Amino acid sequence: MQIGAIRPGVLDLYRGQPGGLNADALADALVFADTATRVLLDTQACVSTDPADSTALGGQFEGMGGYRAEIDQATGMLTEQLGVGIDEAFIRLRAYAYAYDRRLAEVARDVVSRRLRLSPDPDPASDNA
């Protein structure tokens, strides 16, 4: 799974019988993978029976495209702040959101607006005590 330069994970799909996928099946698999990636990046783990509730799975992922742009921008900013590659910056963004029980899009918004600045890891070579 990949969005831009960010690879949040791997998704394996299997067929019921051996052989390649035809064009329609491949297109379906790609749509499924894209949807799964978006769900992983920015949905709350909650269930709502109200279809108008866009903060839950019943909201059909409304507005996720705008969040993705902020997440990509925040990840890019973190590459410079932390002096790391894009994959590491995205991992750090996700780890911060997880550690503080916040949505990834909220943390990204704070990074982009400069309300949040993550610190680089300390240099392990300087711990020679």
Image (tube, rainbow, N blue to C red):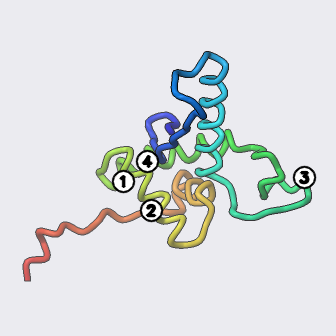
**Residues under numbered marks 1 and 2 in contact, where contact means CB atoms less than 8 Å apart:** yes
Whichever of labels 1 and 2 marks the residue nearer the N terminus, that label is 1
Q: Nearer the viewer, residue 9 or 107?
A: 9
Horizontal and vertical percent for residue 26? 60, 23
Q: CA distance from mark 1 to mark 4?
A: 6 Å
The quarter of the rendered structure image containing the C terminus is bottom left
Residue at (32, 45) in percent of width and height: 85
Number of marks drawn? 4
**Residues under numbered marks 2 and 3 in contact, where contact means CB atoms less than 8 Å apart:** no
Mark nearest the camera among 2 and 3 is 3
Whichever of labels 4 and 3 marks the residue nearer the N terminus, that label is 3
Residue 44 picture quarter = bottom right
Residue at (50, 72) in percent of width and height: 99
Q: Which residue is mark 2?
A: 117
Q: Residue 77 shows which numbered tag? A: 4
Above or below residue 13? Residue 96 is below
Mark nearest the camera among 1 and 3 is 3
Identify the residue at the far top of this view.
23
**Residues under numbered marks 1 and 4 in contact, where contact means CB atoms less than 8 Å apart:** yes
Q: Which residue is mark 1?
A: 81
Q: Residue 90 shows which numbered tag? A: none
Would you call the spot at circle 4 few (<14 residues within 10 Å), some (14-19), or many (20 or more)? some
Horizontal and vertical percent for residue 63? 75, 43
Identify the residue at the far left of this view.
128
Q: Which residue is mark 3?
A: 51
Residue type highlighted by circle 1: Gln
Q: CA distance from mark 4 to mark 2?
A: 10 Å
Whichever of labels 2 and 3 marks the residue nearer the N terminus, that label is 3
Would you call the spot at circle 2 few (<14 residues within 10 Å), some (14-19), or many (20 or more)? some
